[in-house]
Amino acid sequence: MGEGLFRPLHLLVILAIAIFIFGPKKLPELGKGLGEGIRGFKEALHGGMSSENTKVKEESKQIEEKPPVEK
């Protein structure tokens, strides 16, 4: 049923319609917003903690590498 749904010609027609509706200046902004939305959705699915945990681990490594300050 959906074998030929997204063939190259179909994608070109969809792109042409999008350019006609939104204009060439607005499409990059829409693409950026869509990408950020998808990224946020994926982070929410995975608990959203992976990037925060990575930041905390990097900060703790930096603190461990610094020598203690002598007074």
Image: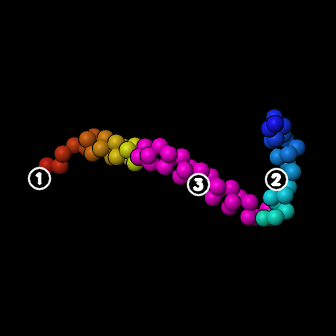
Of all residues shown, which one is farthest toward the front?
A: 1
Residue 67 in percent (x, y) is at: 22, 43
Q: Look at mark 3 in the image and give the residue it sits on.
A: 36
Mark with earlier residue (1, 3):
3
Residue in view at x 81 percent, y 41 percent: 5
SS type, badge 2: helix
Q: Is residue 45 above or below residue 36?
A: above
Residue in view at x 27 percent, y 45 percent: 63
Evaluate whether residue 62 shows in this view.
Answer: no
Q: How far apart are marks 3 and 2 (CA)?
A: 20 Å
Residue 56 in percent (x, y) is at: 34, 46
The three-letter amino acid code for the residue at tag 3 is Glu
Instruction: Tell me the tag on residue 15.
Output: 2
Is residue 40 covered in magenta? Answer: yes
- Horizontal arrangement in the rendering, residue 67 relative to residue 49 (left or right): left
Residue in view at x 84 percent, y 41 percent: 8
Q: Look at mark 1 in the image and give the residue it sits on.
A: 71
Local packing at callout 2 (Cα closer than 10 Å; few below 14, some 14-19, many 20+) is few
Quarter where residue 37 is shown? bottom right
CB within 8 Å, label 3 to label 2:
no
Quarter where residue 68 is shown? top left
SS type, badge 3: helix
Residue 36 in percent (x, y) is at: 58, 54
What segment is highlighted magenta in the picture? 24-50
Q: How far apart are marks 1 and 2 (CA)?
A: 65 Å
